Image (cartoon, helix red, strand yellow):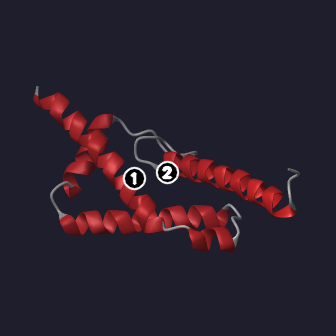
Amino acid sequence: MPQTFVDELEGVVDEVSSWGIATIKHVVTTLSNDGRGYGQEKIDIEQKLEEYRKIRNDPDQWVFWVQQKALEIQNTLVNSGMGQDTLSALDFTKIAVGMMLAYSTTMEKELVKRMI
């Protein structure tokens, strides 16, 4: 059966969605605390742990951290020229919460290494 216009359009949507997901993953990786973003000073693990200890058991600090990360992601994508339709489809808070979980897990593993 030959492909219809709708079939072709669905294929294009799938390709664009895959590209969008890859782009978002790249942005999240670039902004994550585990990696150094372009033009940022490299921070050693002890400095990272010192910063982490400040927010570790403080829910208000975590809320602030997530809000700041969400805003940072949004600003980076806006400044990159990403279209408003794409930006509207993203939940920056969910992305930031995912970053928070990855960051916390990494830092907790580092703390455990230092306890042993």
Name the residue located 67 percent from the left edge and 74 percent from the top edge. 84
69 vs 115: above or below = below
Position of 57 compared to 85: left or right? left
Q: Please tell me which of labels 2 and 1 falls first in the chain.
A: 2
Residue 87 rendering spot, x and y as whole percentages = 61, 69
Amino acid identity at mark 2:
Leu
Q: Quadrant of residue 42?
A: top left
Name the residue located 57 percent from the left edge and 46 percent from the top edge. 26
Within 10 angstroms of label 2, few (less than 14), some, or many (20 or more) residues?
A: some
Q: Nearer the viewer, residue 2 or 67?
A: 2
Residue 61 rendering spot, x and y as whole percentages = 25, 65
User: Regarding mark 1 in the picture, which secondary structure is present there?
Assistant: helix
Q: Quadrant of residue 83?
A: bottom right
Name the residue located 72 percent from the left edge and 51 percent from the top edge. 15
Amino acid identity at mark 1:
Met
Mark 2 to mark 1 CA distance (whole Å): 9 Å
Position of 34 compared to 9: left or right? left
Q: Residue furthest left?
A: 115
Do callouts 2 and 1 mark residues in contact (Cβ within 8 Å)?
yes
The mark found on residue 31 in the picture is 2
User: Regarding mark 2 in the picture, which secondary structure is present there?
Assistant: helix
The mark found on residue 99 in the picture is 1
Q: Quadrant of residue 75?
A: bottom right
Within 10 angstroms of label 1, few (less than 14), some, or many (20 or more) residues?
A: many
74 vs 39: above or below = below
Which mark's residue is nearer the viewer, 2 or 1? 1
Position of 72 compared to 21: left or right? left
- Image quarter in which the C terminus is found: top left
The mark found on residue 78 in the picture is none
